[in-house]
Amino acid sequence: MRLNDVAFRYHRRSSWVLRNVTLSFPPGGVTEVTGRNGAGKSTLLRLLAGIRRPLRGTIEGRPARVGYAPERFPADQPFTVGGYLSHMAAMRGVPDTAITTWAERLAFGDLLPVRLPDLSKGSAQKVGLAQALIADPALLILDEPFAGLDRTTRADLPALLAELAAHGTTVVVSDHQRCLEALPHTNRLHVADASVTPHPGNGPSPWTVLEVIVPAAEAAAAATDLRAAGYRVQRRRADHDT
Amino acid sequence: MIALVRFLVAGYLWSARVLQPLIVIALIVVVVLLQGPGGPDAAEPAVGTLGDVAAFMFPVWAWAARGLLDTQPDEQRALSATAVGRRWVAVGAGLLAAYGVNLALGMIALLVPLLQAVLAGVPVTAVLTGCGLSALVAAAGTLLGAWTSRAIIPNPGLSLPALLGGAVAVLLLGIGRLAWLSVPMIAWLRSAHGGPGAFVDGFPGVALHLVLWSAVVGGAYVAAARVRV
C-alpha cells in the first residue's frame, strides 16, 4: 500500500493536518505511528483505513479486507457484546465461530451477554479490537489500542500483532504509550507539523542477548510466545537453581 | 448490504427511537382517523383520507429516517463502512433501512383508512393507488430525512430546523409556480379529494413526479454522503 503526496484538512479554511505525505507500507510489516496529541496520527490512520479521503494525492493498493479499531470504541449502542459482534461478523461475511475465537483470545468470553453501555473502558476496547480482527484483515489499523487494556492483554497484544504480520497482515498502530517499543522489525513513523517522517530509530538495530529464566514446565510455551513476538529463541540447560 | 440493513434496523428498534414516530402515528390514528367517514357517500371522503395520510406522513417519514440514520454513533458509522468495504454500500444500506422502517410505519398509519375505504365500497384500484402513493411518498420523505441526518448536517442545532424547514419548504413550493421543484402534494390531495376516479386517473402523473424528484434528491444525497461516511 502506498500514499502518494497525500494532503488532508478537515475544512476549507482550516490548516492542513497532513501535507505532502508519501509513504509505503510493505505487506506483513508492523508500523508504529507516534506523535504528540493532535499531531494528526488518528487522521493518518483514518486515511489509511479509507474512512477519510485525501483532498490531494492518492492512496494505492489498499487491501479489500480492512480491520480498523478506533481510539474510543463507541459503546453507546443498544446491543450485547455478542449481538454486536454477530452483526459485525455478518457484515463481513464471517461465521459466528470467529467471535468465540477472538473473545477467548482477548479474554472477554464472559462478557458476550453483557450490554455494550455497561462495559468498562478496557473491555470496550477489547470489543473494538475483536470487531477489527474477526475478518482476518489484510490491513489492520489500530488507533491507540493499548489505552485502558488490562496488563495481561497489553502484554499479549504485541505478540499477537507480530503473529498477524508474520501471516501477511499489514499492521499500522498509533501508540502513544510506546508499548510496541520492544517489538523487533517495527517501522516507526513520527507525525508532526503536518508531515510524516521515519523515526530516527528506524532500520535494523543490533541484536543483544537477554537471558530469561522460566520454570521448566513453561519453557516450551514461553519460547513459542517469544518466537511469535519476533525474537530468536535458543534453549539451553539452566545452571540456576531459582 | 443486507447485514448492515439488519444492524441499522435492530439498533433503531432496540434504542426505542422508533417510539417517537409510533406515538405520533398512534395519536393521529386515534384522534383523527378513527372518526372516519360513514353513511352512503363515504367512498369519496375515504379516498380523500388516503391522500391525507400520505400528506401528514411525509414529515413523519422524514423524521423517522433522520432518527434511524442518526442512531449509529459517528465512530460506528465509520466501523460499519469499513466492515462492508464500499462507501456507497454503507450509504445505500442506510437508505434501505430507513425506507423499510418507513414502509412499516406507513402500513400502521394506513391500516384504519384502508379498512374504512374497503368498508365504504371504494374500488380496489383506488385502494391500491392509495398504497402505491404512500410507498412513493415514503421514499421522498426518507430522502428528505436523510439530507438532514448527522452525516450531512453534523450540528443537531441545525439539522432539526433543516428538517422542519425542508418539510415546510416542500409544502410552500408546491403551491406556487415552482411546484415542479417540490413533491406534488397539492396535486395528489386534489385528486384524492376528487373521488376514486380522479384519484386513480391522476396517479400516473403524481407517481412520475415523485419518482423523478426522489431520483434527483436521492442521487444527490448518495453523492454527498459517500464522501462524509
Image (cartoon, coloured by chain):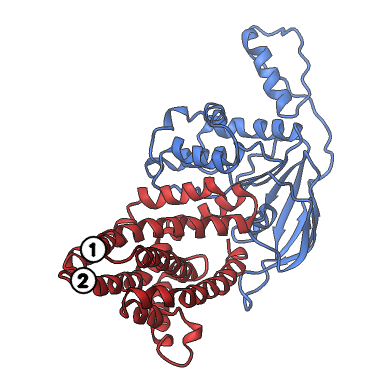
Chain colours: A blue, B red
Q: Residue furthest bottom?
A: B177
Q: Nearer the viewer, residue A81 or B169?
A: B169
At 29% from the left and 66% from the top, the residue drawn is B122
Residue B138: numbered disc? none
Name the residue beneath numbered marker 1: B116
How many marks do you count on the picture? Answer: 2
Q: Give how far across and how far down residue B62 sits, in percent.
A: 41, 68
At 42% from the left and 76% from the top, the residue drawn is B201
> Where A39 sits versus B82, above or below?
below
Horizontal side, residue B32 vs residue A187: left or right: left
Name the residue beneath numbered marker 2: B42
Q: Give how far across and how far down residue B213 sits, in percent.
A: 52, 75
- Subunit ID for the residue under disc 2: B
Question: SS class of the residue under badge 2?
Answer: loop
> Where A86 sits versus B223, above or below?
above
> Which dot, 2 or 1, sits closer to the camera?
2
At 25% from the left and 59% from the top, the residue drawn is B115
Q: Nearer the viewer, residue A164 or B158?
A: B158
Q: Is residue A231 visible?
A: yes
| Residues at marks 2 and 1, CA–CA distance in whole angstroms | 9 Å
| Amino acid type at mark 2 | Ala
Near mark 2 (Cα within 10 A), the count class, few <14, some 14-19 or many ≥20, is some
> Where A173 sits versus A99, above or below?
below
Q: Give how far across and how far down residue A205 sits, in percent.
A: 82, 38
Residue B131's image quarter? bottom left
Q: Which image quarter holds the C terminus of chain A?
A: top right
The reply to whether dot 2 and dot 1 touch (C-beta < 8 Å) is: yes
Mark toward the start of the polypeptide (2 vs 1): 2
| Amino acid type at mark 1 | Gln
Near mark 1 (Cα within 10 A), the count class, few <14, some 14-19 or many ≥20, is many
